Structures are given as structure tokens and as C-alpha cells.
């Protein structure tokens, strides 16, 4: 269930329309894959960083061919860029800890933690991005976000078709959605009806002479906007979706707009490119909310 809070001040910028949906009942939320010890997690307020769940090893397991179990939730997720719903504490969490194309060979760039939840209406992703230099200037929906700080979710619910659905959200909450097919067949006109996204910035935008804290993003993607088996998709427990989650970290340190990419796994290409099946990994829906 998603609801977007539109408007607001800097740091709370809603990007998509409200998607009010009916209430659904409870389901048990399970995380099979995670060795997730929830410590020091509580509801936050204001602009506190959305640092929630310590966890270790999920991304490594996904790289090794493991499957991420995405817990169901019966809690309303308000898509406002704040991961302060209690449901996020039970989400499946992983880190974008691979930087496939860093020129200097350094292992680590800026930290990104991603969380995922689902209910009958939507799949939800929450991002917490450390970012010392937030660059985000594109305000027009569906415009290219190259050069802006952004996070990306690609969902492939029907692997046999190699068709997938793309959601890119900038640090200021601008959304670009499109449908794609391997390899790089893009349908920019496709629109995810009912999808919602919002972002919150901790710091300043478009200023590289100060040090920012980072930004957080919430995304809600309705199942029904995607198709599987030639029909509108409906989610159920044990549904498997292939997922690629990545981030482009823009920085202006060199006077231009350099980008550093991170993800769960490297697609193995020389040049930055996540539009390959090798960039995807498996997610299964757990804990049915009905
Ligand atoms: Ca929220
Ligand atoms: Ca940045």
C-alpha cells in the first residue's frame, strides 16, 4: 500500500502521484537469507539518516547465486523518502558494495544500503545513500538522469521474455521509468501507472564546496504495471522476480560530473552497463500478506 506525500520543503520532494489502495491484512514477514540482527533500530524523526539494520553477507550470497527473500508487510508505506515505517525494520537488506568500473581499483566507494518489502499492491525499495557531494538538477519526469545522483531498480518478472521494467530516481526525487528488453531495447514511452517515489536529501544539492550527508529514496512499484505470462502481474508468496539494483554516484570533484557506479554484482563488462541479464539476481517473495 503506497501513499505519496507531495510537496514539502527541501529534502522531502515527492515525485509521483498518490496511490491510495485498500487495506490488506497481516502476513508473517520472513527473512530466510539474511543473517540480520536488528540492533539499535527504532523509529526516527526529522532528518536523521535512515540507517536501520546492520547485516552482513547478503550481497555476497546473491553474487554466489543465492536468493533474497523479500518479506511481506501489512503496514502502509508512506512514500515520502523517509524509511521510518516499522516495516522497514523487517525488510530484506543488502548493500551495493561492488564498484565494477572504478578506475583507481579501490574496493569501496560511498555506501548504499537497500531494503525491500512487498504487499499485494506493490514492491517497495528503500535506499540509504551516503553521499558527501549531492548533485541533482533534473526536474522533468522521464528526462535522462545522466550526471545526477540516482538509484535504479530493474525488475524482470518473466525471465523467459528477457523483458524488464526500469525505475531510476534521482536524489531530488525525479523519476524516469521505462520498459526494456535484452539487449538495450528501450521503450521510453512506457509508464508505470501508480508507481510512486520520493527522496530526502541530507545536505545541499549542486554544491561541491561543502560536505553532504547523503540521501534516502523510497520507491513503490505496483505489480499490476508489469506483465508476466502475457497478463498483468499479480504477486503471491513464492513469486520469483529477477532484480538488478544499482546506483550512480555523481561528484563534481574534478570540476565536471564524474559518475561512480555500484551494485550487488558486476555485469562483467568493460564499460558501465547494467542492461544485461548478468546484472540480475533472484528475489523470492516471502510471508504472504493476505
Ligand atoms: Ca516512508
Ligand atoms: Ca554524489
Image: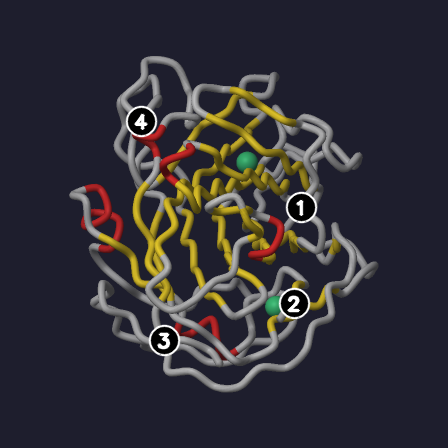
Residue 2: assigned label: 2
Which mark is drawn over residue 192?
1
Q: Is mark 1 within 8 Å of ligand 1?
A: no
Measured Cα–Cα span from mark 3 to mark 1 = 25 Å
Marks 1 and 2, how far apart at CA:
14 Å
Q: Earlier in the sequence, mark 3 or mark 2?
A: 2
Disc 4 marks which residue? 267
Which mark is first along the chain, 4 or 3? Answer: 4
Element marked by disc 3:
loop
- Sequence-wise, which precedes: disc 3 or disc 1? 1
Q: Of circles 1 and 2, which is in front?
A: 1
Secondary structure of the residue carrying numbered label 1: loop
Please report the residue visible at 57 percent of the width from the left and 54 percent of the height from the top.
216
Q: Which mark is residue 287?
A: 3
Name the front one of labels 4 and 1.
Answer: 1
Ligand 2 within 8 Å, label 4 CB? no
Pick whichever, 78 or 147, lies toward us. 78
Secondary element under disc 4, as helix, strand or loop, is loop
Amino acid at each position: 500500500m503506497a501513499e505519496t506525500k507531495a510537496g514539502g520543503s527541501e529534502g522531502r520532494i515527492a515525485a509521483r502521484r498518490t496511490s491510495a489502495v485498500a487495506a490488506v491484512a497481516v502476513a508473517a514477514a520472513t527473512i530466510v537469507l539474511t543473517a540480520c540482527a536488528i540492533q539499535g533500530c527504532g523509529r526516527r524523526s526529522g532528518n536523521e539518516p535512515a540507517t536501520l539494520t546492520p547485516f552482513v553477507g547478503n550481497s555476497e550470497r546473491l553474487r554466489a547465486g543465492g536468493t533474497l527473500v523479500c518479506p511481506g508487510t501489512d503496514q502502509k508505506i508512506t512514500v515520502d523518502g523517509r524509511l521510518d515505517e516499522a516495516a522497514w525494520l523487517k525488510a530484506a537488506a543488502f548493500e551495493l558494495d561492488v564498484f565494477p568500473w572504478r578506475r583507481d581499483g579501490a574496493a569501496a566507494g560511498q555506501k548504499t544500503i537497500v531494503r525491500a518489502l512487498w504487499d499485494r499492491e506493490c514492491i517497495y525499495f528503500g535506499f540509504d545513500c551516503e553521499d558527501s557531494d549531492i548533485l541533482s538538477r533534473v526536474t522533468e519526469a522521464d528526462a535522462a538522469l545522466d550526471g545526477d545522483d540516482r538509484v535504479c531498480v530493474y525488475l524482470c518478472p518473466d525471465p523467459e521474455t528477457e523483458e524488464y521494467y526500469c525505475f531510476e530516481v534521482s536524489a531530488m526525487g525525479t523519476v524516469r521509468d521505462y520498459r526494456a528488453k535484452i539487449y538495450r531495447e528501450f521503450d521510453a514511452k512506457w509508464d508505470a501507472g501508480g508507481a510512486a517515489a520520493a527522496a530526502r536529501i541530507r545536505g545541499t544539492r549542486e554544491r561541491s564546496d561543502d560536505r553532504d550527508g547523503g540521501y534516502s529514496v523510497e520507491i513503490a512499484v505496483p505489480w499490476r504495471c508489469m506483465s508476466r505470462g502475457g497478463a498483468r502481474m499479480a504477486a503471491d508468496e513464492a513469486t520469483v522476480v529477477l532484480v538488478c539494483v544499482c546506483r550512480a554516484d555523481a561528484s563534481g570533484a574534478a570540476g565536471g560530473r564524474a559518475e561512480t557506479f555500484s551494485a550487488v554484482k558486476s555485469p562483467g563488462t568493460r564499460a558501465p552497463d547494467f542492461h544485461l541479464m548478468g546484472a540480475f539476481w533472484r528475489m523470492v517473495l516471502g510471508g504472504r500478506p493476505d
